[in-house]
Amino acid sequence: MNNELQSFDPATGEEVGRVAVTPIAEIPNIVARAHAAQRAWGELTVEERRDAILPFGADLVAESERIGTILTREMGKPLPQGIGEAKYCGAGLGDTLNELTSALSAERLEDEKVLSHLVFDPFGVCAAITPWNFPLSMPHWALMPALMAGNAVVLKPSEKTPLVADEYVKLLKKHLPTDVVQIIHGDEAQGRALVGADVQLIAFTGSRAAGQNILAEAGKDLKRVILELGGKDPLIVLDDADLDAAAEFAVTNSFRNAGQVCVSTERIYVEEKVANRFEELVREKTAALKVGPGTEEGAQIGPMIDAGQRDHVLAQIDAAKSAGATVLAGGGASTGNFIQPTVLTGVTHDMAVMSEETFGPVVGIQRVSSDEEAITAANDSPYGLGASVFGGDLDRAERVARRLTAGMVGINKGCGGASGSPWVGARQSGYGYHSGREGHRQFAQVRVVSRMK
């Protein structure tokens, strides 16, 4: 890698900007500075840490148009979504910090003889390694609980979206003591060096393969890890479902952010009785989507992040077509890094498009004869992040949902839960989890301090 990391607009190929690559030899020193800064930060109360961080939210909202534009130019998503990502993180910060304050405050337990307090102390230094698909939200969801628990944080964002992460950290640093938050830039070599450094907690969001490597390295010193990994989310459409609503969800959730979402719908199981009508609705709604650069007015689907991701997605489409799949909509490349939103029918689990993570604007539809067949097919995967079930009889739909091996299942909706719910993956989609009361507490060392009454 050169001394500078270049960031390119995936829609045009133009350079957006550059940042300096962090020399690997410097990473132990960066972590040492984080340890030195963490001592005083960790001695503050959780309320004092909340009060220090809170003004950052207003700064992020005020800068949301500028930072959101950088996000769109680096990553490709439509500009309203880029700006919205920045605004969402900033505007919701107060509620997030209040939730964290409650989760990380001491809890009293007692019986007839013993009084105990559960207290939540910092681990020390947290290494946060985050991906490019939500390059503001992902650092935000790692840094806020880590900092509120009293840890110092060293962030290593994706080398594909370094500029927007750099802007985020610059704003945040204004409200924190020196070196409580630091950022390093580079590729997997810098990531490996950070994981191997003197950190006590690793919060990672990314691929299953990278998560396996991190877990193996962290295991040498039994470092704590929180891993949110890949997914291959299924949607089950029962024969009594509202087909228009199911098709609308299928198209929206399969293709938003050009399918570059960990909980994108990548495979659909529809019951034979309603399959013809459902497929036609999906075809119509997919054909109506506008593909274009994120800065273009009205664009709904942007480009793949780069040529490598584009080629991976196209290879899955081509392999499925060669194996007998039928293209219902889309089916190939547009120009540059753009791919037409693609719907495939006649797919099977022997095809990579139905068994391996795609992370692109492609979804396969497979017909099933019963609820039982749908459940078996949906569970035929090493992944288990999210899933959805659409059906008219809610009791029946819930029975199906409860038998799915995903960490989060939505009924007639996406997989996200009510406010305060954790974001949790099952099987090989997660190791630990974050958000919600218990998820927040995974960023802290729980201690039980007891005395006799």
Image (tube, helix red, strand yellow):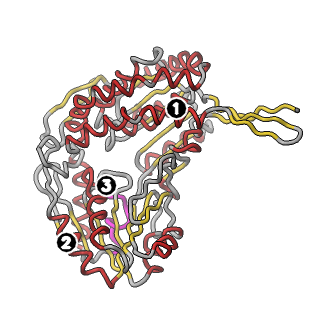
Residue found at x 46% / y 60%? 383
Specify the quadrant that holds the C terminus. Answer: top right
Say which amino acid is labelled 2. Val
Secondary element under disc 1, as helix, strand or loop, is: helix
- Magenta-colored stretch includes residue 356: yes
- Taking depth in this image into account, of 331 and 147 the one nearest to the observer is 147
- Marking on residue 146: 1
> Dot 3 corresponds to which residue?
359
Q: Which amino acid does the dot numbered 1 rest on? A: Ala
Q: Main secondary structure of the magenta part?
A: loop
- Helix, strand or loop at label 2? It is strand
Task: State the image coordinates of residue 379 (x, y, percent, origin top left).
Answer: 47, 69
Residue 99 in the image: x percent, y percent? 52, 37
Q: Quadrant of residue 94?
A: top left
As drawn, the label of residue 176 is none
Q: Earlier in the sequence, mark 2 or mark 3?
A: 2
Check disc 2 and report the residue beneath it: 327
Q: Looking at the image, is mark 3 or mark 1 nearer the viewer?
A: 1
| Residue at position x 28%, y 68% in the image | 247
Q: Position of residue 52 (x, y in %)?
A: 48, 20
**Where 241 sits versus 45, above or below?**
below
How much space separates mark 1 and mark 2, taking CA atoms? 45 Å
Say above or below: 45 vs 139.
above
Magenta range:
348-359
Q: Earlier in the sequence, mark 1 or mark 2?
A: 1
